[in-house]
Image (cartoon, rainbow, N blue to C red):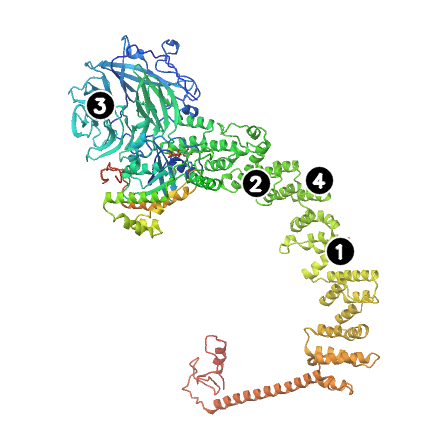
Amino acid sequence: MRKPDGKIVLLGDMNVGKTSLLQRYMERRFPDTVSTVGGAFYLKQWRSYNISIWDTAGREQFHGLGSMYCRGAAAVILTYDVNHPQSLVELEDRFLGLTDTANTDCLFAIVGNKVDLVEDRAAEAREKEGHGPGTAGGGGGGSPQVPRQVRPEDAVALYKKILKYKMLDEKEVPAAEQMCFETSAKTGYNVDLLFEKEVPAAEQMCFETSAKTGYNVDLLFETLFDMVVPVILRQRAQGPPQTVDISSCKTPRRTRSGCCA
Amino acid sequence: MWDILKLASLRESQEPGGELCAVNICGRCGPHGRQTGMEPWLGPCYPAGWLGTQPAVSPWRAWRDAAVSLPLAGAGRASPKSGSGWREGRRSPADMMSTKAFTLVSAVEWELLAGDKERVHIECVECCGKNLYVGTGDCVVYHFLLEERALPTGTATFSATKQLHRHLGFRKPVNELRAASALNRLLVLCDNSITLVNMMSLEPVPSGARIKGAAALALNENPVNGDPFCVEVCIISVKRRTIQLFLVYEDRVQIVREVSTPEQPLAVAVDGHFLCLALTTQYIILNYNTGFSQDLFPYCSEEKRPIVKRIGRQEFLLAGPGGLGMFATVAGISQRAPVHWSENVIGAAICFPYVIALDDEFITVHSMLDQQQKQTLPFKEGHILQDFEGRVIVATSKGVYILVPLPLEKQIQDLLASHRVEEALVLAKGARRNIPKEKFQVMYRRILQQAGFIQFAQLQFLEAKELFRSGQLDVRELISLYPFLLPTSSSFTRSHPPLHEYADLNQLTQGDQEKMAKCKRFLMSYLNEVRSTEVANGYKEDIDTALLKLYAEADHDSLLDLLVTENSCLLTDSAAWLEKHNKYFALGLLYHYNNQDAAAVQLWVNIVNGDIHDSTRSDLYEYVVDFLTYSLDQELVWKYADWVLQKSEEVGVQVFTKRPLDKQQNSFNPDSVITCLKKYSKALVKYLEHLVIDRRLQKEEYHTQLALLYLDEVLRQRSGADSGAAEATEAQLKLRHLLQESDLYRVHLLIDRIRGAGLPMESAILHGKLEEHEEALRILVHELRDFPAAEDYCLWRSEGRDPPYRQRLFHTLLAMYLQPGPAAPELTVAATDLLNHHAADFDAARVLPLLPGSWSVQLLHPFLTGAVRSSVHARRTTQVALGLAKSENLIYKYDKMKLKGSSVQLSDKKVCQMCQNPFCEPVFVRYPNGGLVHTHCATSRHTNPSSPGPGART
Ligand SMILES: Nc1nc2c(ncn2[C@@H]2O[C@H](COP(=O)(O)OP(=O)(O)O)[C@@H](O)[C@H]2O)c(=O)[nH]1
Ligand SMILES: [Mg+2]
């Protein structure tokens, strides 16, 4: 067992599919999951680095543990279910506050999972329209009316809010709009990230996935790994790992206020 | 699996409201050095004895009776009241996959404590080496000596012998006991005061030193103070929200720090400067040196009792929400995933790699390596669970028990036995840094091998292969699973204890042919892979022989590749096997590889003859010929020469003709070969051709014989077909070619033979050989009327001779053409053609008088032009040469005149430049540079290479 070089934490409401995403990525399969208790983690060797990926429990009961899991994280994956708008709202209301303990340069990715269901529904909807317009909600086979899915723009908007929140809080980077604008024109994001303190474009950091089919799962994790590596390097350059001596670590006091409240 | 433990010796608690007591086993070896140098990431060491290999350390090798219930100390006296601390528990899902990591044995029984008292209540325990201390609710401290005894059955028992006990003089329970063996002190917390007592006598120190106002205490096992003779003690003060730190010496105490906390602390553990505190609403890490505090996570103290347990350098285990056992480092980070306990956990202990937890019904065991629950032991009314340097002690209020860890190897074996490969490997790997390297490697390798066999039995060949490879398996272990594959001579015996449970493949596959075939294919590819690696070192024979057997049985192409390349197949074993599977061709290869070419060839010959059957090669005859061709064994070649020739003369003769020439020992005596080939004329011709044409042997006999054989053939063909065939046959061409090219055959013999046979061309060649050009040309011109042949004849015969010889030949031919006769007009044309084509080969002056006057100039135009041109050319060239010679002569004359022009004076004062003597005679030599020397000196100088080149002499 080697000490990990960097940490990535999966956050999000219960049932959005965090555990499934991780298993899909690590084990290449989509098994039935049991509700995660407390947390679990995997070690992933990425290039010459060991990255630990923490799966957390979305249940309210374990909410208090989130801050500790996020402490020192190099990246946080905020996960929601594209079929449940509330799960996106929860990210902002309940989970963002937990990330205050993460590294100051922590990366954020927003992941809308279960897109496979969206596609099914879209197809279904088209079919209905074709066969009998105006009979919506009729005898279509007893499937419950589905809530409107979350649009990707909503996720991008949240991402921008996060940037804003982080920057306002830390007062050391230019305004969020400017940042997004600058970086959205860039492509070689991980290189830029290493040398300049810039944040990748919102679109780049918002994913839609399906743990069931494996859609976008590798892309998600591997994009993130690539971006975490420079963070690890930067941390190393800054001196001894912050895991040993917290007294020297100038982590700002957590603000208990919600992110954009 | 599910451990049902019954403890017969426990009694029902008679007094629920009993007094406070405490058990403590003393084990503090001193304040310093405990677990220092340990990897913070790895957690504590495996306790000694886990490997179960040193009986002295591991007297509790209770492997065999894994299912047996708790050994009873007083076995003969089963109490009817037994079972109070235990119950036959419900089955929980985790038990389905349990590991037997610990067995529970009794250490101190109620009778030992209670004596004649009616009631006793164990309040706390401390263990330090063999010293076990128990504190009770009625303010008594007991000291026991703990003896560990291995039983012949493999289990261990503990017996505690009471040393003494002391009443501390309060009416309060003993809350906590801590031993500081370096100071020989026991710290006793009772009535909010910590007293120092002698570890052996239990007498308070004379100085009466004590710490007052303590609600709870913790020792710093990673002390920051450098003094080996003091212990760092941290207390929760009775003052609100206060922690105090003390240094405790043999007979005094000294307060070093007081820290106030944001909320009331309920539990504390210390590591270095870090305090891990359970406050009223949350856990925090507090650096008492800097005052910096780090929140860990919130919990609710009203709902449950907090647990704060130091588990190793800079790492703590905490009771979290929802029954989680949370790990946290001093930096406030979790480096291990939490373990999942029940909600009502009372205590936790560590015995690497396990986390043990106690609730009111069970002891649960989780692995820190995979967070899985591994074992559940029913244990009722327990209220203390602590580990003391690897010894885990649980206690009810009535008795003290020890959780005896099963040797790690035993646990791993159990996992393997239930085919839980992953877990077994994780457990084994987890031990890597806790076991001496060599020992670990041996153990781990064996586990990998066993795991490999488990995967193998499940036909998970990829996984199996990887495990065999990393486990450096002796391949023969695998081979030996397959019946009859190992050579009978192999010295191999399976390792003991066995790496798997299978007698052989039949048992493993239960006769399933398809599985069997898969296994065989796997072994084939595996052996093929490893045979050239170092894995094969030392038993190449076994591997190659097994591989050969597999290939032969499966009719696999690689069988032949194996045999024709370097291999170590054992002869007797392989031969029998190949024979059994009718692989005779391969068997031949095997014989050949083992230098038994005679046997090999005999076998192949038998196949070709149809005596035995093996269709491996359809071209086996050619193969045998080829084999003999390259064989160095002449005897063998002779032995089968007749056989190969009888099959096919042309192919068979190759054994003599295609032999590589470079090797001396490889060449046969041509005469013996010829004798042998007497019966096979075609073969003989081929062989002679080989000698004469390929090897250019200059021996008259071969040439003559070959020519005669050709001639025979020509004549034979002649007699068959009608004799006037215009086209020369192939045999004829060969004959002519030989007659022309060779100078060695006996010309006269052939002329005699050929006479009257109607072979004019051949006769012409033979006459030509005898320089009888007139006759030869006569035949060509008059008999054959083959003018181009006549022309060619002149060219052939004059090849390499001087031009006059050639001219003579052409003139002879021309003369023959110009002879008057019946065929004159035809010959005339030939003559003009000859002249026109070979103008340069004639002397025009001699030709012109011969020509009939009637011929037109036009007819001979090319000849005449050529003749005139060459004549003019010759004249002009001569003139040029003459002119050049003249001018050269002129140059020499000029030089001579110049040299004569100057005079040389010779007097007796002049000396020879070489010998420096005066000239005594008027004869001298003068060099172009003017130097004068004696004639004899000049002569000797000529022979001296170092002197300058000679000049002109006068
Ligand atoms: N259709 C679909 N179902 C998913 C997907 N990801 C997760 N699920 C299901 O959602 C449920 C909750 O998943 P889980 O991974 O336990 O969520 P977590 O609580 O966030 O860890 C499970 O029943 C999964 O099978 C997905 O991409 N598509
Ligand atoms: Mg989960």
Q: Is mark 4 within 8 Å of ligand 1?
A: no
Q: Nearer the viewer, residue B571 or A104?
A: A104
Q: Position of residue B669 (x, y in %)?
A: 69, 54
Q: Nearer the viewer, residue B675 or A177?
A: A177
Q: Amino acid at mark 3?
A: Ala
The answer to whether the residues at label 1 and label 4 have Cβ atoms under 8 Å apart is no
The quadrant of the rendered image in which ligand 1 is seen is top left
Q: Is mark 2 within 8 Å of ligand 1?
A: no
Residue under disc 2 on the same chain as residue under disc 1: yes
Residue B216: mark: 3
Q: Amino acid at mark 4?
A: Ile
Of badges 3 and 2, the one in the foreground is 3
Please tell me whether mark 1 sits on a helix, a strand or a loop.
helix
Where is mark 2, residue-wise?
B568
Task: Give the Cα distance between marks 4 and 3.
Answer: 95 Å
Residue under disc 3 on the same chain as residue under disc 2: yes
Q: Nearer the viewer, residue A209 or B509?
A: A209
Task: Give the Cα distance between marks 1 and 4.
Answer: 30 Å
Q: Amino acid at mark 1?
A: Lys
Q: Position of residue B918 (x, y in %)?
A: 43, 84
Q: Residues within 10 Å of mark 2 (few under 14, many from 20)?
A: some
First in residue order: circle 3 vs circle 1: 3
Of badges 3 and 1, the one in the foreground is 3
Residue B682: mark: 1
